[in-house]
Amino acid sequence: MTDTGLTAQPRMPSVARLLAAQVGYQARLLASGRAVTLGVIFPVILLIASHSRGTHITAADVAQYAVFGLSLTAWNTYGVRLVAAREAGVLKRWRATPLPRWCYFLGRVLATVVVATLAAAATVAVGVLLYHTHLSLDGALGALAVFVLGSFAWAATATAVTAAVPTVEAAAPTMMLIYFPVVIASGALGSISEPHWLSTLVSYLPAEPLVHAAGTALGYSAGHTWLPGRDVLVLAAWAIAGIAVSIVTFRWEPHRPTQRRSARSSRQVGSTSSRATGNASDAGAAPTTPPMQFESAIASDA
Amino acid sequence: MTAIAVEELTKRFGNFAAVDGVSFEIPQGQLVAVLGPNGAGKTTTLEMLEGFLAPTSGTARVLGVDPHRGDRRWRARIGLVLQSTSLDAEITVRDTLTMFAGLYPNPRAVPEVLELVDLSDDAETNVGALSGGQRRRVDVAIGIIGRPEVLFLDEPTTGLDPEARRRAWTAVENLTTTGTTVVLTTHYIDEAEHLANRLILLVGGKVTADTTPDRLRTQGGPATIRYHLPDGTPTGDLPANLAPHIDPVTRTLVVRADDLSGPLRDLLAWVDRHHLDLSRLEVGPPSLEDAYLAAIGDPLTLEGTRR
């Protein structure tokens, strides 16, 4: 990096501090929106509406509702908000600051992990308190780990998908269109009969392994499996793949309609008759910027 | 000390040269307005200086650094107020500024910045509840909160009402007293005239003039008399050298001549005969708007112009 002669300047804030502040800020934003209604209250209402008071609900049942709330938050709420922020120019505003770009991006994802995990935990708490779902400390810790990994996988995948969503109007339908088939086929909203090939396919998507791993962890007792390795691997693969695709495709700027412009003529005459030199932005000359280069951003920010 | 140095900067999108061989230097502390019609290349030039776009050819240095390779230490010395950005709506103005202040090594105190942009009374209001003008001032506040050495303002007052524009101007003027170099793009001639001590005109991606407002004005043609006639004034006995210069719609007399002494003497005598109010009489060089339109319509090679 070029020497900018800043030896006497105050130190830059540490990246760890910036990331922590960003996670707190984004979590606060997320919690102040409808995420709480959708991801926390909705699954709890469904749980209570589907079971009469005092009945016993198994860990596997509670896991389904918890994963429903978690994935609604980490997929739909996160994805739609990300597109809305990009199209409104919020991402561009942050990109214009000294905050490392990966720090902003990771802050948003980790904030979503926190809120989605809390949403799942709230549903589990209702199961334990109202429906006598048995939960050991080991089981709670295992479920926590699964919720964190699962919400990271969903949010990372949603990040990758949002690059292909051009407008805010298209965001919710696109996210839902992908979400519901995956979640319904996973059995998170109740078991369904499905052909073998579909069961196999679903076992590689992030919903079914998450439901299974969460149910296994929540119902853990000595001598049984704590965290099913295959499910954890599938979720980790989605998390890594989501991040990898996002690094290539993530965009900070709103999509702009494609413009075709002829080569510049040798003389261009402005046409104005008011005290303004024009009325519209000349930003149309610049196309959307290329995808974020995470590697160079990380290298230069380190 | 040079804050910004640009040499033969060019940006092409396919066959289209949005910026075409632009060169200029801006010393520290100068407030420069970049003017030009739509598509002139103003925003593209700024985006290259801000590090968001890589030039096709040529070089740019901002505070001695290639903007496209600037790290976060460099970016902490730059303030940006961009077009078409926005802020998270569900957070108060104070919390927003506190969050952004935390990104810089030596930020201004939040109350100081609120005062600078005249938003102290709205500090506890959510950003989403602010008017367009107030939000733009929050943008300006974020642009200056890190004590930038160079501040880029891309059309900071577009869409603001006259009062909001004046307030934004005051905020920018307050900055120049601290030695900040400011580069401003604007559609508004009066804004450039009010704020800038240097104008760079871009037309067709090229610099067609690099001058001061006063110098540009002198290039706009001969000196001018403007007089808005009071309502109901009969014009039948206007002297022959004035009568053809009345605009019947606006009832404004506009006379342009190298030597205005004759027309001015005749006008004053006529005004005196009719006991008219002189408060709407202007005599002076052509307006900056006239000079600007002349410059972009028929690009001039003005003093100090680089091509």
Image: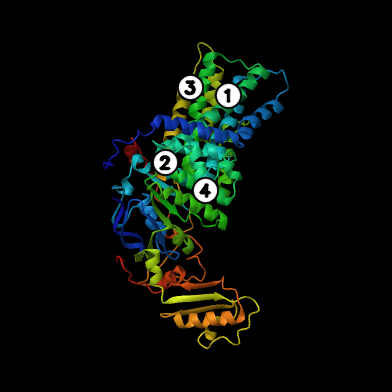
Where's the C terminus of chain B, which quadrant?
Answer: bottom left
> In this image, B258 relative to A43: left or right?
left
Residue type at mark 2? Gly
Other residues around mark 2 within 10 Å, as few (<14) / some (14–19) / many (≥20): many
Foreground pick, A118 / A243: A118
**Image coordinates for residue A100, horizontal then vertical, percent:** 39, 38
Residue type at mark 3? Pro
Q: Residue at x 43, y 44 (%)?
A: A95
Residue A121 badge: 1
Residue assigned mark 4: B137
Distance in Å between CA atoms under marks 1 and 2? 40 Å
Other residues around mark 3 within 10 Å, as few (<14) / some (14–19) / many (≥20): some
Residue type at mark 4? Arg
**Image coordinates for residue A72, horizontal then vertical, percent:** 58, 35
Q: Earlier in the sequence, mark 2 or mark 4?
A: 4
Which tag is nearer the camera, tag 3 or tag 2? 2
Residue type at mark 1? Ala
Where disc 3 sits, the SS reads loop
Residue assigned mark 2: B146
Other residues around mark 1 within 10 Å, as few (<14) / some (14–19) / many (≥20): many
The answer to whether residue A64 is above or below residue A94 is: above
Q: Chain of mark 4?
A: B
User: Which quadrant of the figure has residue B236?
Assistant: bottom right
3 and 2 marks in contact (CB < 8 Å): no
Distance in Å between CA atoms under marks 4 and 3? 54 Å
Where disc 1 sits, the SS reads helix
Where disc 4 sits, the SS reads helix
The answer to whether residue A279 is above or below residue B166 is: below
Residue A228 badge: 3
